Image (cartoon, rainbow, N blue to C red):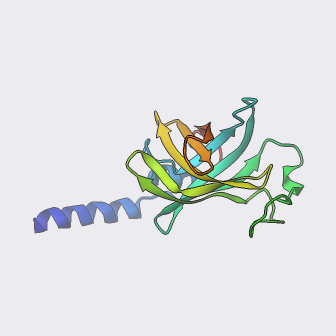
Amino acid sequence: MKSMIRLASLALSLALVTLPACPAAADAAAAGADSPIGLWKTIDDKTGAPRAIVRIYEQDGMLFGKIESSFTPGAEHRVCDVCDDERKGHAILGLVIVRNMKHADDGYSGGDILDPETGRVYHCKMHVEGGTRLVVRGYIGFSLLGRNQTWQRVPQGAGS
């Protein structure tokens, strides 16, 4: 038993030493195909048009997501005027829109997601499908009262 613990400790130490310095590469190295950690292209569920690139990252054992870039012209000058919480007046680029997601049996849940176009905050669930799609569900009250968006994983090196 002790030798198994030593071997696991050695493997973990080796993995930590060999992690890449690039944040996007580090995200990809830390995340397996079933992990949502990394860069995702958000797709508008009504129009099918790409909206933004969101970085999902882990902090204090929970997942968060912030807007890295936007496909909307002029986004670099926009702030979240419609937000009602502490994010009001903050720049859209860099805005944390997914917060406090915890691992659950079938994915991640327990957190919330902000729609920066309306300022509304919804309960959130998400899970990875096939390593390349992140199904994000925002809802009010019960999960049945909501809608899904399917985000596409940004290939390694494309967003860094």
Residue 149 rendering spot, x and y as whole percentages: 63, 37
Is any atom of residue 23 visible in this view?
A: no
Q: Is residue 106 above or below residue 67?
A: above
- Residue found at x 41% / y 44%: 106
Total numbered labels placed on residues in the image: 0
Check the image and report above or below for 130 versus 68: above
Side of 61 where 98 appears, left or right: right
**In the image, is residue 148 above or below residue 115?**
above
Residue 133: x and y in percent read: 54, 36
Quarter occupied by residue 103: bottom left
| Residue drawn at x 49%, y 57% as measured from the top left | 20
Tell me: 15 left or right of 24.
left
Q: Quadrant of the N terminus?
A: bottom left
Q: Is residue 25 visible?
A: yes
User: On the image, which quarter does residue 135 sit in?
Assistant: top right
Residue 160 lies left or right of residue 107; in this view the side is: right
The one nearer the camera, 148 or 72, is 148
Q: Residue at x 78, y 55 (%)?
A: 119
Q: Position of residue 69 (x, y in %)?
A: 74, 49
Residue 31 percent across, percent down from the top left: 45, 50
Front residue of 48/57: it is 48
Q: Is 46 displayed left or right of 60 in the figure? A: right
Q: Residue reaching furthest left? A: 1
> What residue appears at the point 86 percent right and 60 percent down from the top-left corner?
81
Question: Which of these two is toward me, 49 or 119?
Answer: 119
